[in-house]
Amino acid sequence: MLAVESLILAGLGVGLASVAGVRAFVPLALLSLFVRLGFIAEPDIFGLQIGWTVVLALSALAAVEIMLDKVRALDPAFGFVMIPIRMVAGALLFAAVYEPGVLFDAGAVPGLVAGGAIAGVVAGLEVILRPPARSSSAGVSTAFLSAMEDLVAVIGGVVGFFLPLVPLLFVGFLLFFFNRIRKRRGRKYGGLRILGD
């Protein structure tokens, strides 16, 4: 029974860490909200309690991250800057659901490492596969791509607290979609590479 519970918790950690690779602060804001509402156990972060101030602060950071991601001039630099932040978010989320008792002890290290690695891989692939702002002529705009990421982060973040691994499917679809757009753009310009620059 304990092994099954560990697998479920690991699945929740994987799902939430993958969402953190798309948006760092959305799943953290959702975690703090669900803790505050009593849906999940509160992780012990240096003995601090998660209050409404934390929920509001993380929600504000999520809103700022979402807005900045839509600024065409910041693409793709913003994505690269956010990779380490998303890795930290993924590490915290994985450890918080897998070992909620004490987040920063030796037992939490595997969860922190796994969550950081998952979020880092997703964040890196997102930056690599997401069509750059200059390629809006490929049929999609930066704002549209960013809005898709927002949907995956919010829906995946909510679902991730209840259905293990399902958010990973959302993230996988997002990355697949980005890759298809890049390939389509490459075929469109073909030998006329100068038109794609």
Image (cartoon, rainbow, N blue to C red):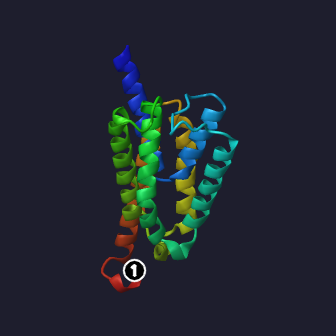
**Observer-nearest residue: 192 or 49?**
49
Q: Residue at x 34, y 35 (%)?
A: 106
Furthest residue to the front?
Answer: 47
Locate residue 3: give its quadrant.
top left
Query: What amino acid does circle 1 point to?
Result: Gly
Residue at the far bottom: name it. Answer: 194
In the picture, the quarter occupied by the C terminus is bottom left
SS at mark 1 in the image: helix
The percent position of residue 42, horizontal first and vertical second, equals 56, 31
Work out whether residue 35 or residue 68 is closer to the camera in this orientation and state it: 35
Residue 191 visible to the viewer = yes
- Left or right of 61 on screen, residue 160: left
Q: Is residue 76 visible?
A: no
The image shows residue 42, relative to residue 136, as above or below, that is above
In the figure, 109 relative to 117: above or below?
above
Taking the image as shown, residue 190 lies to the left or right of residue 139, namely: left
**Mark 1: few/some/many CA within 10 Å (<14, 14-19, 20+):** some
Q: Residue furthest left?
A: 191
Q: Residue at x 40, y 70 (%)?
A: 185
98 in relation to 188, above or below? above
Residue at the location (47% across, 77% down)? 134
Q: How many marks?
A: 1
26 vs 43, nearest the viewer: 43
Assign the N terminus to one quadrant of the image.
Answer: top left
Q: Position of residue 144 (x, y in %)?
A: 57, 62
Q: Which residue is mark 1?
A: 196
Q: Position of residue 74 (x, y in %)?
A: 51, 73
Which residue is located at x 35 percent, y 71 percent? Answer: 186
x then y, percent, for residue 188 = 39, 73
